[in-house]
Image: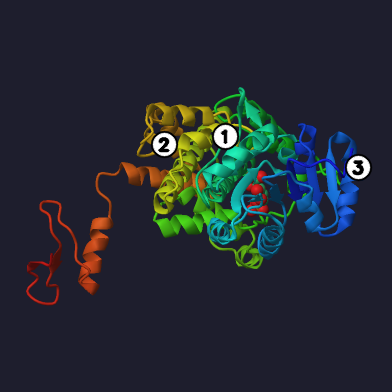
Amino acid sequence: MTDKNELAQIGVVGLAVMGSNLARNFARNGNTVAVYNRSPEKTHALIEAHGEEGNFVPSETIEDFVASLERPRKAIIMVKAGKATDAVIDQLAEAMDEGDIIIDGGNALFTDTIRREKEVAARGKHFVGAGISGGEEGALNGPAIMPGGPKESWETLGPILESIAANVDGTPCVTHIGPDGAGHFVKMVHNGIEYADMQVIGEAYQLLRYGAGMEPAEIAEVFREWNSGDLDSYLIEITAEVLAQKDPETGAPLVDVIVDAAGQKGTGRWTAINGLELGVPITGIAESVFARALSSSTAQRSAAQEGHLPSGTITELDVDKAEFIEDVRRALYAAKLIAYSQGFDEIKAGSEEFGWDVDPRDLATIWRGGCIIRAKFLDRIRAAYDNNADLPALILDPYFKGELEDLIDPWRRVVVAATQLGLPAPVFASSLSYYDSLRAERLPAALIQGQRDFFGAHTFQRTDKSGTFHIEWSGDRGLTQTD
Ligand code: 6PG
């Protein structure tokens, strides 16, 4: 239904699939939605195909679009992140009045969001960078939404976003994350965790396929079973679907006809870069980004295959298949746990750096539904932060510590097996090193400090007294205190 005289509670600019689906979700949930797209064909197509789902107010100019919104006006931008976003923000800010709210629902880089918020605020309007997760289906049926921006915008926006968000046990999967770029920052880390989650699933598949010699359809069944336990999650569920799928053209397992070069649009990379900048060891996420990059280094990979790099001695798997499957399940669970623990570390560090006061409990709550990383295990993460809001690391929570007691031996066995089988398992292996590094009483960092002092007089601290020290390496090798 369309009614030009009715004022809309919310507007959507940009009607590609995500924007259209979000507009339909608003309309289906009783909101009157203003819709605008630069080329009006998309607007017409939306109204033609779905106009009966609710109240839409279509416009062909941005001015008409803005005029069709009730005050304070609320417009969500769903255009391709980047320059297009700035152009639309400028047009909206021009046509809007003081106190109106511009929301960017794309995957924007949080530093852009911080900048945009300042610029829009200077023009007397509010700007909210909102991470929206759940893909096309989520946008239509209930995404997880992570809005940043000023708290007062949340008061106006909150109810309308709650009306379209996913819902778990009566709690909507949306909450105000924090000021300016906080929403897009946590969405970025969500995506980093998404990369790691997908990579560890991939590593488990690789081991079952080429280590245990199982066929994709058989592995699909294993994932189906795993989805009813600790690993219960959207990504495990869709993995079973993908593995069970046959290629409609050849009848071969679909996974065998897909080129093994993973793409990326950049959010995982941003998460890794930010982790490096903040000095947070998000090894699982970074390793997953590198794993995608390596998979896509096709020229180098074929040269390495043709040149037959030596494999060393490869041993066959010599354990019972059922036991190996269970070991792989536990290794996957452990590596996933590390990735989440590291992701939450990054959020904590980002929140401190930018003064956002992000509550990790909120994220564990709203990520339980709608988003790509939705998983049963987020309930446990929520409970962990309920018990101790200042947990030094998620894996130090007593529940997860208890889980790790059960996971650690199988995890070690799987990393050893992968090494002996000559199969890559970068996140399984590096997460285990991260874990052992955290546990280690002494790290080789002491030696690195000694080396730094040797070649650059970079000084070091001592374990037995405070102060800063240097050894006269090229002189009498005596100790001097520099501070
Ligand atoms: C989501 C997803 C989504 C992301 C895609 C693509 O939460 O709905 O994270 O926002 O854009 O998954 O990511 P890559 O192309 O980088 O894999």
SS category of the residue bearing label 1: helix
Identify which residue, 464 or 387, lies in the foreground. Answer: 387
Kindly indicate the quadrant of the structure image that contains residue 479. bottom left
Mark 3 residue element? helix
**Which residue is the site of mark 3?**
49
Q: What residue type is disc 1 on? A: Ile
> Which of the labelled discs sits on residue 366, or is there none?
1
Q: Position of residue 320 (x, y in %)?
A: 55, 30
Q: Image point 58% across, 32% down: which residue?
A: 368
Question: Looking at the image, is 289 positioned above or below residue 255?
Answer: below
Residue 404 lies, in percent from the top left, at 41, 31
Q: Pointer 3: residues within 10 angstroms few (<14), some, or many (20+)?
A: few
Q: In which quarter of the image is the C terminus?
A: bottom left
State the residue in front, 362 or 412: 362
How crowded pointer 1 is (Cα within 10 Å; few <14, some 14-19, many 20+) is rated as many
Q: Do the residues labelled 1 and 2 touch (CB within 8 Å)?
A: no
The answer as to whether callout 3 falls within 8 Å of ligand 1 is no
